[in-house]
Image (spheres, rainbow, N blue to C red):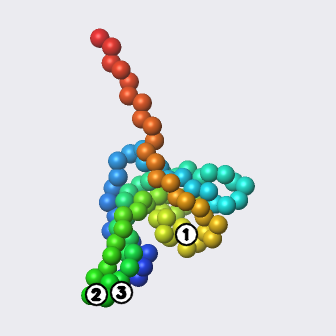
Amino acid sequence: MKIERGNVISVSSCAPDWIVAFDLGDESGEVICPVIGWATVAEAHMSDGTTSTTIEPAFVYGDTIWTPTELREHTPGLGIVDIRAREIRSRQITR
């Protein structure tokens, strides 16, 4: 199998409450999507035959799972994809 730039090589689960936020470049405003895992994505082929990789969030948008690299290929006006952890408020236990 030839691994192309942008191919997902593997996916690992992530802790809950991670999200990605991005703007599609239209009037719809900021889009917030849940991250379901972390993907190892092929970034470049080296002259020695190895592949350089990067870790990207795998997230649900619409009815599809995307990485930022894949979404950029299909969305010309896409701005920055921001990875965020939702604010988690802990409850104080009173005795």
Task: Assess disc 3: are there few (<14), some (14-19) or many (≥20) residues with their C-alpha within 10 Å of its C-alpha.
Answer: few
Q: Nearer the viewer, mark 1 or mark 3?
A: 1
- Name, please, the residue furthest toward the front: 47
Asked if residue 61 lies left or right of residue 4, the reply is: right
Q: CA distance from mark 2 to mark 1?
A: 26 Å
Residue type at the position of mark 3? Lys
Which mark, residue 49?
Answer: 2
Asked which secondary structure carries label 2, the reply is: loop
Task: Assess disc 1: are there few (<14), some (14-19) or many (≥20) residues with their C-alpha within 10 Å of its C-alpha.
Answer: some
Q: Where is residue 18? Give x, y as percent.
A: 43, 48
Q: Nearer the viewer, mark 3 or mark 2?
A: 2
Q: Where is residue 71? Give x, y as percent.
A: 54, 67
Q: Earlier in the sequence, mark 2 or mark 1?
A: 2
The residue that appears at 37% across and 59% down in the rendered structure is 38
Residue at which label 1 appears:
72
Quadrant into which the C terminus falls: top left
Q: Nearer the viewer, residue 13 or 21?
A: 21
Residue type at the position of mark 2? Gly
Q: CA distance from mark 3 to mark 2?
A: 11 Å
**90 relative to 26, above or below:** above
